[in-house]
Image: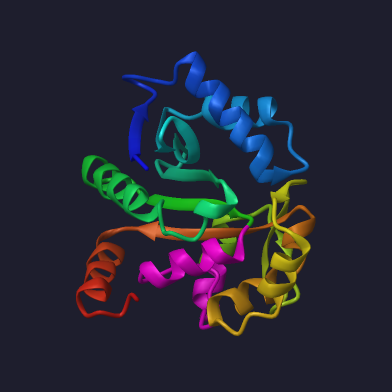
Amino acid sequence: MKHYQIDKVSTKNWLNALETSQITELIGSSFKGVDSQAYFQRYFNNPAFYQRCVRLFYQQDQLVGYCLLTFRKNTDNSIVMGASAAFLASYRGNNNTFTFSFLWALKTWLSHINHNLYYLDTMLSPAMYRAMGKKVAFIYPNPAMTETEIQLYQALVPDAEPSQWRNLACLKTVGRSTNYSDDEVQSLKASNKAEIAFYCQLNPRFSEGSALLVLIPVNLKQIVCTLWKWASGAVR
């Protein structure tokens, strides 16, 4: 079967009517508790973002997944990258989104070198947390966080809700969840994979509309250490 990808940027070649329809249909089938039209407007058409880019994943002519990145500027001169991704169940877990996200993060950092740049995601999936945690050098929250790192993290997510892990405020009630089956939810909660187990400790209600606020700083240290992590074979 033919697999291909299409990249779209809001300032150049944004979505046409067919692509918009395909995405809203995929959103509706990928999440529970979501109004797909409202979700699309909030993330794909929100004027609060100065730029949006999306990679569309196709099998034949069927949209099987997307990865959306959003960019907004804060009054403190920082830039926050956000993300939304959805895939048909059979296409989950293939690390389809990381390279796209990393290259855009690198490009944005290089073109805004005097800004603080952060990737901040309301992450619904323990598997996605593991995929990102295996790839990047520094991700927050993590089980080895120091008190200083906790204070810095909390300052960047001031409205977060508390978890039971060290009373860390790192959760957000979003009212939607990944469309996991009951068996998939139980399998994730019983997983002995370190990153998934830690996510579930922080956010045991991930199947009930609770998300983990995942913060990844994008700076020289992150980029160098992440590339070194790849080169040294630490990512498997």
Q: Quadrant of residue 220?
A: bottom left
- Residue farthest to the top? 17
- Residue 172: image location, x then y, percent: 71, 54
Q: Position of residue 112 (x, y in %)?
A: 27, 41
| Point 50% across, 59% down: residue | 215
Q: Residue at x 50, y 18 (%)?
A: 18
Q: Is residue 46 visible?
A: no
- Quadrant of res 221: bottom left
Given residues 62 and 99, the one toward you in this image is 62
Name the image quarter holding the N terminus. Answer: top left
Q: Looking at the picture, how far across and down is residue 206, in whole percent? A: 72, 61
Tell which of 230 and 59 is nearer to you.
59
The stretch drawn in magenta includes residue 221: no
Left/right of residue 188 with respect to residue 120 in the rendered view: right
Residue range (magenta): 125-151
Q: Residue visible at 50% across and 75% down?
A: 148
Give residue 151's position: percent from left, percent from top.
56, 69
Extreme front residue here? 1
Asked if residue 123 lies left or right of residue 34, the reply is left
Q: Residue at x 59, y 74 (%)?
A: 196
Answer yes or no: is residue 95 visible: yes
55 or 136, which lies in front?
55
Relative height, residue 139 to residue 23 (above, below): below
Quadrant including the C terminus = bottom left
Total numbered circles: 0
Q: Is residue 148 magenta?
A: yes
Residue 112 or residue 25, whichever sits in front = 25
The image's colouring method is rainbow
